[in-house]
Amino acid sequence: MSTHAQIIDFSNAVAAELGDEAITLGDDVRHRYGEHTLPGPDVLPGAVAYPDSTQAVQTLIRLANQFRVQLYPISNGQNIGLGTRSPIVPGQVVVDLGRRMNRILDVDEKLGYCVIEPGVSFRTMHDELKRRDSKLMISPTAGPSQGSILANALDKGGGSGAYADHFGMICGMEIVLGNGDIIRTGDGSLAGDTHPNWHVSKYSFGPTLDGLFSQSNFGIVTRVGMWLMPRPPHIEPFFFTFPDDGDVAEVIERIRPLKLSNFVPTLIRATNDLYLLASVATNPEYAASNGTRSLSDEGRAALRRQHGLGSWTVSGALYGASRAALMPQIERISNHFLASGKGRQIPLEEAETIAPLHIATNSNTGVPTDSELKMLGWRPGGGAIWLSAGSPVVGSTVNDFQTEARRICHAHGLEYLLSNVCGARFARSVHSIIYNRENPDETARADACYRALSECFASRGVFVGRAPTMYQSFHQAQRMPEFTRACSAIKAALDPNGVIAPGKYGIM
């Protein structure tokens, strides 16, 4: 860990080479960057740096190696529920790439891609495409709208549309390694300055290195190419709701063939009641138990009736030439989901009046939104932990997992909030643990709940996809030791002095 004297010397050297605006030691700034929503104390950085170019990042890394200072790179710092902007350990220097490296470097309308720096947000990209009257669209997350496209992709985040695999849509990176080298991946690795295939050909000569820089600490990515989807003439969202908790088994069985055949081009979400309702309501029973008990089944049922939803809601969208052209497909999907007689279709006109469903409509039509983050107000105190596990798209398996996970949440006096984001074979199961971070007992229960859920999934061979910063070493320890040794060997080769975020994703 860097000493205070080392950080001071490093900061003075950064200011001398990059200017006073490139770094700050201010206590108020450091405190803001140390804040998060996880069940642990805030993690204050030693300083905060603001590079404005790849070369400035290279300078920071060179000086970090010289003064043996640890850096923690972020983009826009919107990783809420996963660590926000705070470093892994106190004293690391946060490198805020988003503040000054926020340029859209290119938009290629013909080939459908953009080239962006870390600070380009979903909202910025959406607004720029709209300004250009572009025929392209982004695949936004369900929030936050100011989140970095690049950072979300590198952390294996996703959206809802046909281009929802954000890391899969990356083509061509520029990276500053921990040893100070600047490399380009793919066709960009060819010597010279002209690379017409850099952002259109994913698999070039030799090894494909891009994956090394996802959820790792081997280098700092300073620009990427991202593929964008041509906007269809018409996008038709659809919604179905099912009344009972156990209905998720049938729902998943009906989703799988629609995705295996790609009849539905978007991912299909199967979202439980409270995950949706927490964005528009607060826990009506919280005060009665001071947060020691989860919401009762009667309380859940009352909220569902109030908002016209069931225990599970299915959402997705179709693309076509017009709404009329899509009606036969909508009818087929309707017959498919309603065959058992349990579900109910929510017509689009009705869905537009149900506020929790606006999130899916916006995500599937390429419009960034912050609505989902309103779930942080479900309980007071601003605490939130995101747990992204997953499951094969098999109804009985998903139902078994939801039954056990629901039991664990209730045992810890917390609500069960889940959204299954389903592809053809795998459903990413996004769990939201919302708790009162100002209540020590509730904070301890939230931490215990996260660990219990993680251990439950791991005992059944299911790993997490993304992990909050304070749990990354915990999850790395669940791996086979041979894998962790391989990560350490790569770290030693590319960042021999360990200056880039040691401990991130458990890699030292």
Image (tube, rainbow, N blue to C red):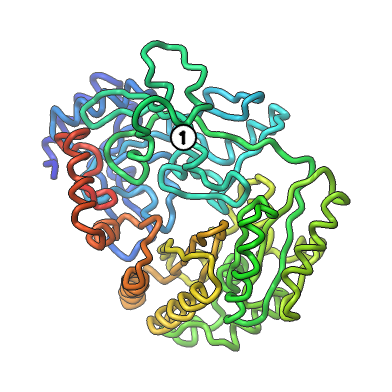
Q: Quadrant of residue 234?
A: top right
Tell me the amino acid under the disc marked 1. Answer: Gly
Task: Determine the residue located farthest toward the right in the rendered image.
Answer: 324
| Residue at the image position 41 percent from the left and 63 percent from the top | 387
Position of 248 compared to 320: left or right?
left
Question: In which image quadrant can residue 176 be found?
Answer: top left
Image quarter in which the N terminus is found: top left
Question: With 95 as the anchor, is 422 left or right in this view?
Answer: right
Q: Residue at x 58, y 29 (%)?
A: 113
**Residue situated in front as seen by the camera: 339 or 346:** 339
- Label 1 residue SS: loop
Looking at the image, which is closer to me, 323 or 423?
423
Relative to the observer, which residue lies in front, 122 or 226? 226
Question: Could you say where residue 82 lies in the image, as x and y percent from the top left?
Answer: 39, 56
* Image vertical order of residue 157 relative to residue 132, above or below: below
Q: Residue at x 62, y 59 (%)?
A: 268
Up-down relation of residue 417 to residue 16 (above or below): below
Q: Is residue 329 above or below residue 183?
A: below
Q: Nearer the viewer, residue 26 or 366?
A: 366
Q: Position of residue 488 (x, y in %)?
A: 19, 45
Quadrant of residue 48 within the rendered picture: top left
State the image coordinates of residue 141 (x, y, percent, origin top left).
56, 50
Q: Position of residue 16 (x, y in %)?
A: 23, 20
Q: Is residue 41 left or right of residue 272?
A: left
Decide if residue 125 is in sight here.
yes
Q: Is residue 377 above or below residue 172?
A: below
The residue under the point 74% across, 60% down is 238
Q: For residue 439, say whether it is visible.
A: no
What residue is pinned by disc 1?
119
